[in-house]
Image (tube, rainbow, N blue to C red):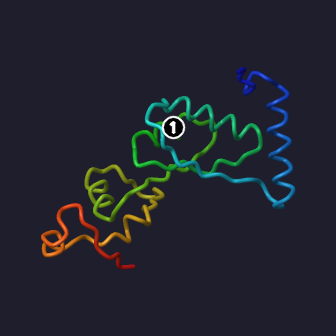
Amino acid sequence: SKTVFPMNPHASHKIAKDIERIQDAIGEPLRLVLDLKSRRVPPRVWSRLIDNLRSRGLLVDGIGSFDVDELRSIAKGCSYRLTPILFFHSVGDLQRSCHANEVKQGDTVYFNAGSLMWKRATIAEVAQNGCCGTSDMTV
């Protein structure tokens, strides 16, 4: 099958029209925060994609990832200001990153909520359930 985007100008125009319809329906510009998952996409490609989305009327407010260096590199490559959102599993991970001087004043930090609700097993629970056993979550 043929790829219609971005080579087909009709497809690009349709995307812009769809974005416009969504914005009309919600009464304000469509805003996105992208959660980066792929480790195989170079930062310059992410930067170009984000600039392309913005050129079509989408407001990409930020990008989030566990990889601090990747986020900063992508943000530098964008034509407009972009907020890197640093993801962490735990406060301990944040603390380690602060000690490594990776987190700077003014950075935006998000936590993986599921990781924050996880209750660490006690030695007695590990002995009873085995190393991979489950225990009740405390919220």
In the rendered image, the quadrant that contains the N terminus is top right
- Name the residue that disc number 1 marks: 74
Report helix, strand or loop for mark 1: helix
Task: Give x and y (percent) for residue 4.
Answer: 75, 25
Q: Is residue 44 left or right of residue 31?
A: left
Task: Give x and y (percent) for residue 32.
Answer: 65, 51
Task: Give x and y (percent) for residue 23.
Answer: 82, 54
Q: Residue at x 48, y 43 (%)?
A: 37
In the rendered image, the quadrant that contains the C terminus is bottom left
Towards the viewer: 74 or 76: 74
Q: Residue at x 48, y 58 (%)?
A: 108
Exactly how many numbered labels are in the figure?
1
Q: Is residue 106 left or right of residue 24?
A: left
Q: Residue at x 40, y 41 (%)?
A: 69
Towards the viewer: 89 or 82: 89
Task: Give x and y (percent) for residue 18.
Answer: 83, 44
Q: Residues within 10 Å of mark 1 (few under 14, many from 20)?
A: many
Q: Is residue 139 left or right of residue 18?
A: left
Q: Residue at x 42, y 65 (%)?
A: 114
Residue farthest to the bottom, as pictured: 139
Determine whether 52 is above or below 25 in the image: above
What amino acid is at disc 1?
A: Ile
